[in-house]
Amino acid sequence: MAVKDVTKDAQNLTMTFVAEFDAGVERVWQVWEDPRQLERWWGPPTWPATFERHEFEVGGQVRYYMTGPEGEKAHGWWTIVAIDAPRRLEFDDGFADQKGEPVDSMEPTRTVVTLEPAGSGTRMTTLTRFVSVEQLDKMSEMGMEEGMRLAMGQIDAILAGTPAR
Amino acid sequence: MYNHMVVDQRGEVDVDRVFRALADATRRDILTRVIRAGESVSGLARHYPMSFAAVQKHVAVLEQAALVTKEKRGREQIVHGDVTVLRTAMRLLDRYEQIWRDRAGRIDQILRED
């Protein structure tokens, strides 16, 4: 795997991320299409994702939650805007309440995923558009928190005399 | 609930106003100019095919979003760009980049199991 390019636009609030994987397009598509595989990478190890609903079609609804170290749950939803298997996927991604229903007052982000052959591998491009700095803040909260909790977990393990993973 | 965001020590910034301010091409152009160097409103007005009043209105929207400040110099108003909000957005985008780097690593691990 190689990260090929990251482009950030602070004025338009977009981020484009490009990575190449050593597998064919149809195989990489599966990590999005199969909810059991998607669960294994969407969230970090300390906030793993669980996808309860995963309708992979135009207008399809996706419901997921991420579970924190203390068992707390953060819910999210997707609506599939466009799909062209195995090459392109476009979806809105937003926050949901504890019942898993979209929070109306918060705008979703829009993500476009494209998969293209790159030699014998696949180039995956994700372009995410945010509506506001505060939305971006909320969505990256979990990333920061995860780093901190991981560090705390390792310190705890050392103090308890057990080997840190 | 989430309409405000603290930006460094500047106090609260209304994020909705920032977004609306940046949604206009003329305002983005004005902001780019005054980040490079302060310019009077009349100086700015010369760059755009619109009335002085229209340019004044654009500057007012940018000021209300805390993206620019105005300084009175004699009879002129000098408009200065403020990069604080843009810097914050950039910092948050950096964080988001890390999230995708970590995800790409996990996708790679799944693919290696084949």
Image: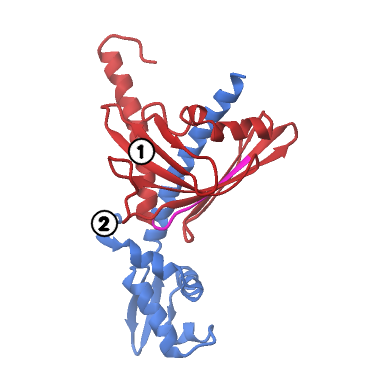
Chain colours: A red, B blue
Name the residue beneath numbered marker 2: B9
Which is nearer the eye, A100 or B104? A100
**Residue type (three-letter) at the residue carrying disc 1:** Met
Q: Position of residue A30 (x, y in %)?
A: 59, 31
- The chain that hosts pointer 1 is A
Q: Secondary structure at mark 2?
A: loop
Quadrant of residue A147 in the image? Answer: top left
**Residue type (three-letter) at the residue carrying disc 2:** Gln
Residue found 33% across the figure and 35% down from its top = A145
Q: Position of residue B4 (x, y in %)?
A: 27, 58
Q: What quarter of the picture does the C terminus of chain A occupy?
A: top left
Residue found 35% across the figure and 90% down from its top = B75
Quadrant of residue A6 in the image? Answer: top right
Q: Secondary structure at mark 1?
A: helix
Tell me the magenta residue range. A124-132
B61 lies above or below A75: below
Q: Which mark is residue A81?
A: none
Residue found 39% across the figure and 57% down from its top = A132
| Drawn side of residue B19 relative to residue B114, left or right | left
Name the residue beneath numbered marker 1: A142
Which is nearer the eye, B7 or B16? B16
B108 lies above or below B68: above
Q: What quarter of the picture does the N terminus of chain A occupy?
A: top right
